[in-house]
Image (spheres, rainbow, N blue to C red):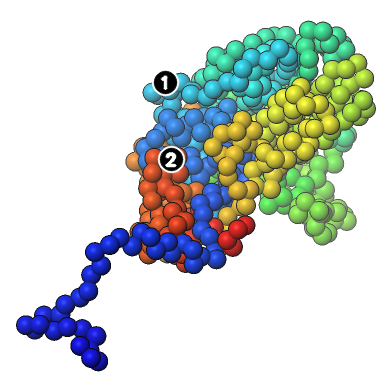
Amino acid sequence: MGEKAEIIIADHLLIPRSSQSTESNKTGSWRFLRPRYDEKTAPCSAACPAGEDIAMIEMLTTQGLFKEAWDTILKENPFPAICGRVCFHPCERRCNRGEFDEAIAIHAIERFLADTAARNEFKSSLEKQPERKEKIAVIGAGPSGLAAAYFLAILGYACDVFESMPEAGGVLRWGIPEYRLPVSVLRSEIVRIEDMGVRIYTGTSVSRDFLSNARGEYDAVFMGCGHSRSRKLAIPGEGLEGIEEGIVFLDRIRRGETDAVKGTVAVIGGGNTAVDVARSVVRLGGKALIVYRRRRQDMPAFEDEISMALEEGVEIRELLAPVRIDRAGDYFTLTVQAMRVAGEETDGRAAIEPEVDKADEIVIQKIFKAIGEEAAEEWYNPAERGKQRLTLGNSVLVHRDDGIVVAYGGDLTNDTKSVVHAVASGKEAAMALDVFFRKGFHAIQQELAAYMVGNGPSLSMETYMKGRRSERNHHVVAYDEINIDYFNLAARITQPRLLIDERKKTFGEIDLKISANLAIREAERCFNCGLCNQCDNCYLFCPDLAVCRDDSLQGRHINYDYCKGCGLCVVECPRNAMVLEEEGQ
């Protein structure tokens, strides 16, 4: 054989072959870097005040597992059908897909799942904790009170909810127009909460004495009364007959007590109530004019609602501050002061000041005030003193001198007045009360910090109850951590809506349902940031065959006897569901 490394016989190449297994050569001993599966947090979930597991919801939807996806929402939010309609979806602004082409239509998928659940009469698979001896009173059956009762029921507590109105729902029932939230949708969500054992007493008002007398019958109280009293303009003529509160107008519409509106109507304000009033005026036959003292981009109303209002013919007059109202016969004269931008406030909105000698008069048939609401009674607000007081991300807890603990949530504690923020406060308060009963007041803040979604302030009830989500890393996946080579550009679905001319004539729901095919197609666009969807890239790219499939929840494991730590699996993971770290960490 001499110098030749190969043997040639009859023009054939003979290749040496071992007759023994190479399993004894455990190449993993060469390793100084170690890959492992490490599921992380999607930015949409961190941005969702309710902390929904959005990446998992989209993954399940992609697989056609609609019931499981709906159940996943219910772990963190009792109102998928409501939030799928009225939430301003801050999650979509943080969606990594938005840097690639367009953000996922998360709210449309959530609504689809809720409508599918209703149509197929799905029953929730959520498991409640063992029954507790403590009993909680909830004041107010709005979104925060109902959410608090829902999560307390999951944690095993008996809840009585007291509501002064003839029907539960709060702003969901009386303050959001039918074209955004049909009453049948609201009622079905509330029935699910009652089915969990929550008792709701409607037409039942409580007084200040309730808190003092609750001790003995209740171990804690949740205050979720909301803001229902309109703020004053504090200008001459404000009290003239015919000038109405916007929130009262919306309430009358929901009761079916409103007649047609004629002529031009001024709506003073820039929040969601102002926009809802203006759009309702259009549907009742009037011409709506919103008067706002700052710029349109400074309006606290949701951008989608503002855009649709403009489509429907609502006019917005910006940088005008009302200074006086006069009446002459059937008309009002609204005197307005022109304002100009004089910088920027800490919240990013324009700082404004009057333009000297620039005033105008607007002649209209009717005026609605909608400059924001406040608590109807001062005692609804969080008490300033007590044995102990704790301010959390979305709620306030006060351990009163008489021994009872009172949790405050919803509009009473949230800077952002939205349904999903109300849900967040109800959940946070429920978890805080559970920690109080189990470990004491001093343990609440530190205990809840462990259940934040990402860096908070959103909390996860699934994590709190030691579900699979509790195994996740709090790290929020950034766009540059996604391997975008595995994704194709795809357009976001367009939300089907009633034609403009149709919706101006009716209070029927504007946004229409999407099909299962559309929902799946949209969910497929999701990066599923930080989650393993068992795409098998790690299995296919491993040069050592060290990735092994199994029957675990993860669906695979790494055989470290043979993994050399090359990191190919980590690099080729599309969703950043793996990590490469130093051996021994």
Coordinates of residue 489 in the picture (x, y in percent): 41, 60
Closer-to-camera residue (303/67):
67
Name the disc covering residue 262, or none.
none
Distance, label 1 to label 2, CA atoms, is: 31 Å
Residue for point 62% across, 52% down? 475
Q: Residue at position x 85%, y 54% from top?
A: 353
Q: Which residue is mark 1?
A: 121
Residue with the most extreme left position: 10
- Extreme residue in the front direction: 2
Query: The N terminus appears in which quarter of the rendering?
Result: bottom left
What amino acid is labelled 1 in the image?
Answer: Glu
Q: What residue sits 61% from the left and 52% below the top? A: 476
| Above or below, 294 relative to 428 | below
Q: Which of the labelled discs sits on residue 552, or is there none?
A: 2
**Number of numbered discs:** 2
Describe residue 36's horizontal placement relative to residue 523 as left or right.
right
Instruction: Judge the density around disc 1: few (<14), some (14-19), many (≥20) Cα neighbours within 10 Å.
Output: few
The secondary element bearing badge 1 is classed as loop
Q: Amino acid at mark 2?
A: Ser
